[in-house]
Image (tube, rainbow, N blue to C red):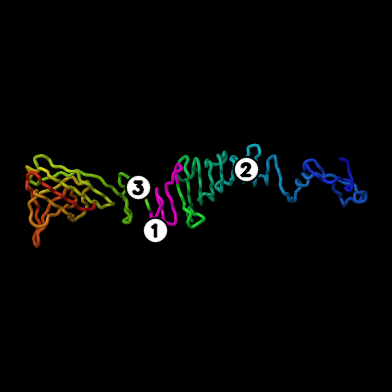
Amino acid sequence: MPDTKITALTAISTVDPAVDVLPIVDVSDTTMAASGTTKKITSNQILGAGGTATLASATITGDLTVDTSTLKVDSANNRVGIGTASPGALIEAYTNTNGQNRVFINNPSTGSSAYNSIDFTGGTAGNQILSMGSGYSGSFPYTTGALVLRSGQVNGMVLSTGGSAAPIVFGINDSEAMRLNSTGLGVGVTPSGSGGCLQLKSGITFPATQVASSDANTLDDYEEGTWTGTLKGSVSDPTTPVTETGRYTKIGRVVTVQIGYENVITTGASGDISISGLPFSNSSAIRTLGSAGSLGGAVFTGTLVSELGSASTSINFQSINSNASWSAATHSAGSFRYFWAELTYTV
């Protein structure tokens, strides 16, 4: 395009910023100012030379690079990088080394094994980590495919919703597992009690082998089951062994047992009555007393009780008399005999 006076130019209708020219007059050149001669420059040259521009909209068909790595749009791979000139993910914001501050979405290929994650760890000590996918290979365990929430060592981590009635819900395989709302915390069930309650759908599971705690305020065990009690005599046992299935419940150190024999034959039994086979030994330094009863099978005077000695696993039947020493209840052997015992002790 030859030099043309500005007054001779036609009106601009469309502009290709790469090739179309804008006429300018160099006012410092007195010959140009006098003659009206113009010089040519494209809009690309203007934007590339520095300064600022205000655009109603812009379409960029290639890469976009801002300050080398402040912002990078990779048009070939359809990726956006913040803080990196070579984004390895659909969106990747990256700082490190151990400056952390990383945001990865969709399988990054640079600098970390944390895939599909949002990671604002704030340095080696860490503040928060939200990791989705293959986990984060840092200083805590992870499981492939897990969602990991991890707080730092100072202020902890807060999960909160925008409204007072909005719950925080945790789920596995699209099924709700736990819900926290203004009513309380529900595990497997929506809590419906008063504020601050813990509501469970199916109870608390303790390990099969107790992991004992030295903390006096810690409940470290719960167990319930059956035990086999054998009716014994201090002189001789029943000719045909008499056994029955009892039940027990253990909560921490406290054990409660029950057993009953109904319509049994005790022929051959003699001496003091006892039942062996308790599931746990009594650790108390003193005797433990409970309730007992017999129909036709025991000889005693006074009140019949069940008694468990220290470090023992056998229940004895004892008779307590007013203003007198106690004495053992003895067998009245025969058919159609009944015995019951229940007591609570510590282990």
Which of marks 1 and 3 precedes in the sequence? 1
Q: Are marks 3 and 2 in contact (CB under 8 Å)?
A: no
Q: Residues within 10 Å of mark 1 (few under 14, many from 20)?
A: few
Question: In which quarter of the view is residue 335 placed?
Answer: top left
Disc 2 marks a residue whose amino acid type is: Val
Q: Please give left or right for residue 45 compared with residue 329 in the image.
A: right
> Would you say 233 lies left or right of 103 here?
left
Task: Choose top left, top right, bottom left or bottom right for residue 333.
Answer: top left
Query: At which x and y percent is residue 30?
Result: 91, 51
Image disc number at residue 80:
2
- The one nearer the camera, 11 or 280, is 11
| Of residues 344 and 332, the one drawn nearer to the viewer in this rendering | 332
What is the span of residues highlighted in magenta in the rendered image? 171-198
Q: Is residue 158 visible to the viewer in this orientation of the structure? A: no
Q: Which mark is residue 194?
A: 1
Asked if labels 2 and 1 touch by Cβ distance under 8 angstroms, the answer is no
Residue 274: x percent and y percent?
13, 48
- Identity of the amino acid at label 3? Ser
Query: Element type at marker 1?
Result: loop
Give the mark, 1 or 2, whose residue is nearer the N terminus: 2
- Residue 245 badge: none
Residue 128 location, x and y as percent? 51, 50
What is the C-alpha distance between the residues marked 3 and 1?
A: 19 Å
Relative to 49, 35 lies left or right: right
Question: What type is the residue that disc 1 sits on?
Answer: Ser
**Viewer-nearest of labels 1 and 2?**
1
Identified at 27% across, 47% down, the residue is 224
Residue matched to label 3: 202
> In the rendered view, does 270 fall on the left or right side of 257?
left
Q: Which of the two residues, 260 or 324, is positioned nearer the viewer here? A: 260
Count the numbered circles shown.
3
Mark 2 Cα within 10 Å, few/some/many (few <14, many 20+)? many
